[in-house]
Image (spheres, grey):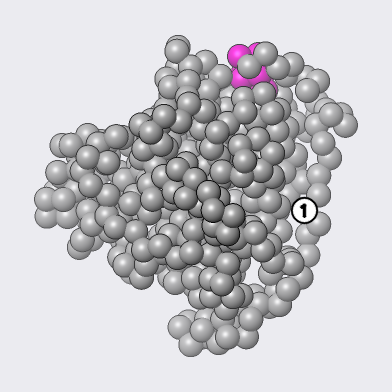
Amino acid sequence: MAADARAVLLWSPELLGYDFGPGHPMSPLRLRLTMGLITAFGLLDDLDVVAPEPASDELLRLVHEQAYIDHVRAEDGAGPPYPWGIGDADNPVFAGMHEASSRVVGGTVAATRAVWRGEAPRAVNPAGGLHHAMPSAASGFCVYNDIAVGIAAVLAEGAERVLYVDVDAHHGDGVERAFWDDPRVLTVSIHQSGRSLFPGTGYPQDAGGPRARGSAANIALPPRTSDAAWLRALDAVVGPLVEEWRPQLVVSQHGADAHHRDPITDLDISVDAQRAAAIMIRGWADEHCEGRWVATGGGGYDVVSTVPRVWTHLAAVVAGRPIDPTAPVPESWLAQVHELLGEDGPAAMTEGRPATFRRWEDGYDPGDPVDRAVLATRRAVFPEHGLDPQHV
């Protein structure tokens, strides 16, 4: 890699075409406002912007069945939802569905390939993170699974150990399913428990297939889990695993819907903690795989206050220029928000939370439901890696 190589941002206004229509939570306005805030902070001076092309059927078939691809393409997925998952309230048909969805995939594939090949040190695709899509069905606002295809693309180029970390409030079920029995991919998802949130999966005992035991780690958290416990849980599970497993590439999904303002989830994770998680994940990549890190967006339905700040912080960490949490939000962006929506945006890039936590090695509290969730995950996964669930 050239010494002056810069991190890559996958972006094109055409990505706004992934649009389920008025009133749908997955509004492309999230991306428009995020790019506006990224631009207002001058981050494009530190990122190479690459416009992604739609992924080919050959690429999509690394994860998806051709019959499903054909259905999405034919009349943009029109027809009854069963068995394809398209046409219901979550995944309504929209014009250009195949092209828009495959463009998102093309962005994440371009990101993973660029970083894996040494053409860029890091990359971010804010439009990506569609982690629920299954091989032959759309699910949870996700038509094609860009993350799974991106990982599969670098596996095809010889990658042997890819770590996937998913901090979305919802279980990263589609990515986990794609690599359930593949020992080359270690998937870690920290999410609100499936007992109280879609998709109803992702329990500690779900730890990988028979040929890949320990390749899936699920941290299922109770509702209202807050910053310190969330960061402690992420560190307590991923930290020892990444130290032992030594990935060659880190891929992460940064759905912003764990935030306490999100309208469809029940966690209590601030913008500050989500910024801290991005810094933590970059640190693992820097320490264990020469910095090779690909980040995506994901869920997040508090469109104005939360998503743009979380993903702008993420892009800044990827660029190598983290934004001070106390920095004021640029007036030019606030003017954009007011012009588009007639409302005020957040004044600063912080919510005033410290984003600190107590490390696992400092003690385990059996009365704490989050500590119990963490220990359940460690007990299910750590022995498969030769690690002590209690004391590492």
* Quadrant (top left/top right/bottom left/bottom right) for the C terminus: top right
Main SS of residues in magenta: helix
Instruction: Please state the extent of the stretch shown in magenta in the rendering.
Output: 377-384
Report the residue that reaches farthest toward the right.
362
Instruction: Name which residue type carries label 1.
Output: Ala
Report which quarter residue 49 is drawn in.
bottom left
SS for tag 1?
loop
Classify mark 1: residues with Cα within 10 Å, few (<14), some (14-19) or many (20+). some
The residue that appears at 27% across and 49% down in the rendered structure is 55
Q: Position of residue 360 (x, y in %)?
A: 80, 31
Q: Position of residue 220 (x, y in %)?
A: 60, 33
The residue that appears at 61% across and 37% down in the rendered structure is 289
Residue 175 visible to the viewer: yes
Indicate yes or no whether the magenta region holds residue 123: no
* Residue assigned mark 1: 355
Q: Position of residue 365 (x, y in %)?
A: 83, 29
The residue that appears at 56% across and 19% down in the rendered structure is 214
Q: Position of residue 341 (x, y in %)?
A: 48, 82
User: Relative to 338, is 154 on the left or the right?
Assistant: left
Indicate yes or no whether the magenta region holds residue 379: yes
The residue that appears at 36% across and 63% down in the rendered structure is 51
Residue 218 visible to the viewer: no
Report which quarter residue 192 is drawn in.
top right
How many discs mark residues in the rendered view?
1
Q: Is residue 165 or residue 77 the one in the foreground?
A: 165
Report the residue that reaches farthest toward the front.
2
50 to 83, vertically: above or below: below
